[in-house]
Image (spheres, rainbow, N blue to C red):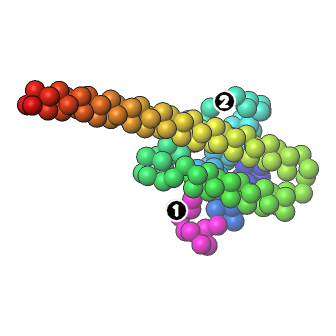
């Protein structure tokens, strides 16, 4: 049985399925780790620069549905911690445990970077919208002042 197949056994424990059921928060982290493990077995490389678009898409979808980025980040952190705890107990080989820990770290960092990038983009868009609103209010104020002077 391969490492990725043995890792899949940890799904219920890592996602806390007893409490959340099939819609566990942070399931995108588990899926990204699982994909990376399968890819590692096929390609036999640890390419940390590889971008997981499925992870980015899943995280962006949660944000698009109105979830707070900090709540999504907390979910990612909790799932990562449960995976690490389960991996320490389940994998007796130090090499396997280290492989899981390294992949969890890479995926968690990728998720954090993506959430930070989306949050900064959202903040810059909100700031630009606020500036446009302030400029419109200033223009309206000057027009109103000009009209009041004309009416005097």
Marks 2 and 1 sit apart, C-alpha to C-alpha, by 27 Å
The quadrant where residue 92 appears: bottom right
Q: Residue at x 68, y 54 (%)?
A: 77
Give the x, y percent position of residue 3.
Answer: 77, 49
Residue 20 is one of the magenta-drawn residues: yes
| Circle 1 residue | 23
Front-most of 113 and 34?
A: 113
Q: Could you tell me if residue 98 is visible in this image? A: yes
Q: Is residue 85 above or below residue 117?
A: below
Crowdedness near tag 2: few (<14), some (14–19) or many (≥20) residues, C-alpha within 10 Å? few
Between 82 and 118, the residue placed more toward the observer is 118
User: Helix or strand or loop: what does disc 1 sit on?
Assistant: helix
What residue would you read off at disc 2?
A: 50
Left-right relation of 28 to 86: left
The residue shown at (49%, 43%) is 60
Span shown in magenta: 16-26
Q: Position of residue 102 (x, y in %)?
A: 80, 42
Whichever of callouts 2 and 1 sits on the residue coming sooner in the sequence is: 1
Majority secondary structure of the magenta segment? helix
Please identify the quadrant where the C terminus is shown. top left
């Amino acid at each position: 049985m391969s490492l990725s197949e043995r890792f899949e056994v940890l799904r219920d424990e890592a996602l806390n399925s007893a409490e959340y059921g099939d819609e566990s928060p942070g399931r995108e982290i588990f899926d990204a780790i699982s994909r990376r493990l399968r890819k590692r077995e096929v390609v036999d490389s640890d390419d940390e620069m590889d971008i997981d678009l499925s992870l980015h898409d899943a995280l962006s979808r949660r944000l698009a549905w109105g979830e707070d980025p900090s709540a999504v980040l907390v979910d990612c952190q909790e799932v990562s911690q449960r995976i690490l705890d389960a991996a320490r107990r389940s994998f007796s080989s130090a090499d396997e445990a280290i492989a899981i820990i390294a992949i969890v770290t890479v995926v968690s960092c990728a998720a954090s970077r993506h959430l930070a990038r989306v949050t900064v983009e959202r903040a810059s868009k909100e700031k630009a919208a606020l500036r446009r609103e302030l400029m419109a209010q200033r223009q309206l104020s000057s027009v109103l002042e000009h009209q009041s002077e004309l009416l005097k």
